[in-house]
Image: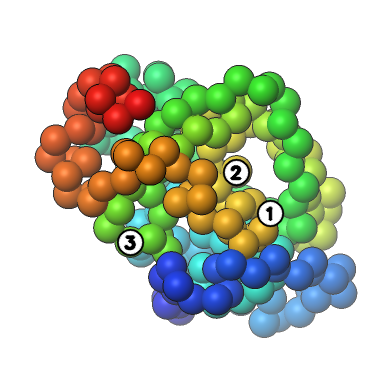
Amino acid sequence: MQLEIVQAGDPVLRQLARHVQHEELAAPHFQQTIADTLETLRLAPGVGLAAPQIGLGLQLAIIEDRAQYHASWTPAQLQARTRRPIPFHVLINPRLEVADDAQLEFFEGCLSVEGYTAEVPRFSRVRVHCLNERGEPQLIEAEGWYARILQHEIDHLNGKLYVDRMKPRTFMSLKNYTDRWRQHEEEAHRIFG
């Protein structure tokens, strides 16, 4: 079932999500929430969706960056972002650690800030300790675009949006980004940076 994605201004997006208790994981409604969140993510389409974005204040997020989403990007753009397909997976009660202080700045959007984008600095490498949908401990080590997605989704679980981290002068509509800047990001970085 497709769920409604809440937009900026909804209080749930600014609250610290509560930890999911181990006994909640096996509940049929919890597993159905994961399935519904995945359907919503794919229909949006997007690469990540956190429970607060569907109105639930839970430490739950899903990630999936499908190869078909890469078709409109040049090989150079994909390489600059270290962007590769990422299979579907679930993060429950994630804890993020910075693995490298170096930061990369790329344009980023959000399904809860529909129609806009901005350049956001993010750490280039991170580690995430979490549980999967079966309650099994996981350690994820990620770099590049995958690290960016993890940071973005975990921010949602902590009541933050990318607009809290963005370079304000780069904030623009997706249409302007696509029409004017996407193919010339180096120039955009020089002008807005």
Label 3 sits on a secondary structure element that is loop
Q: Residue at x 77, y 58 (%)?
A: 93
Quarter of the image that includes the C terminus? top left
Image coordinates of residue 119 in percent, x first then y, are 39, 37
Type of amino acid under label 1:
Leu
Image coordinates of residue 86 in percent, x first then y, are 52, 39
Image coordinates of residue 95 in percent, x first then y, are 77, 47
Residue topped by disc 3: 114
Task: Please name the colour scheme applied to the rendered image.
Answer: rainbow
Check if mark 3's residue and mark 2's residue have beta carbons within 8 Å.
no
The foreground one among 77 and 1 is 77
Residue topped by disc 1: 91
Check if mark 1's residue and mark 2's residue have beta carbons within 8 Å.
yes
Label 1 sits on a secondary structure element that is strand
Please tell me the numbered disc located at residue 150.
2
Task: Give above or below for 156 relative to 172.
Answer: below
Q: Residue at x 78, y 54 (%)?
A: 131
Q: Residue at x 67, y 82 (%)?
A: 29
Q: Is residue 188 left or right of residue 56?
A: left
Label 2 sits on a secondary structure element that is helix
Marks 1 and 3 sit apart, C-alpha to C-alpha, by 23 Å
Image coordinates of residue 120 in percent, x first then y, are 45, 38
Marks 1 and 2 sit apart, C-alpha to C-alpha, by 9 Å
Type of amino acid under label 3:
Glu
Can I make out residue 187 in this image? yes
**First in residue order: circle 1 vs circle 3:** 1
Q: Nearer the viewer, mark 1 or mark 3?
A: 3
